[in-house]
Amino acid sequence: MTLEVYDPEKLDQWALRVLDVAANLRHMANQCRENDLAGPVLHDKKASEWLAKLEQWSQQATAHVHLRAVQARAQRRAMASTSLERKPAPARRKSQRKAR
């Protein structure tokens, strides 16, 4: 099995392919309804297995992307906080100090 980098464009292409398949299935369902047809006889074992694997693949990839996004955000925040110059707080006058 080969791991490949999926840039946003490639993810969009996959999404469109899946949507095309979904559109075909919806079209068949509508044709059957509109024409009072019995549904087609299909072998669905392999398709069901494939869909389950695709769902699992998608969930794992989503979790991985979410984790990387959180890590990148944390790293940017850490870099921003270390790059800020810490200015000492201005000295308060006696009248501004809290009473103890």
Image: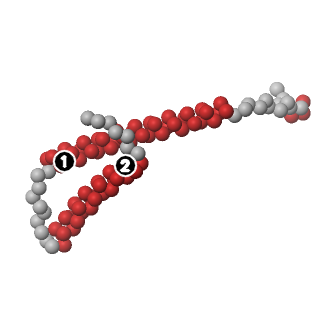
In percent of width and height, residue 19 lies at 30, 57
Read off the residue under disc 2: 10
Residue 5 shown left or right of residue 25 in the figure: right
In percent of width and height, residue 73 lies at 54, 38
Lower sequence index among marks 2 and 1: 2
Residue 48 shown left or right of residue 85 in the figure: left
Q: In 3D space, how far apart are the residues under numbered discs 2 and 1 (Cα atoms)?
A: 24 Å
Look at 27% across and 45% down and name the residue there.
54
Q: Secondary structure at mark 1?
A: helix
In percent of width and height, residue 55 lies at 29, 45
Read off the residue under disc 1: 48
The part of the image, by quadrant, that contains residue 100 is top right
Which residue type does callout 1 highlight? Ser
Residue 97 shown left or right of residue 11 in the figure: right
Q: Residue furthest bottom?
A: 35
Residue 52 shown left or right of residue 37 in the figure: right
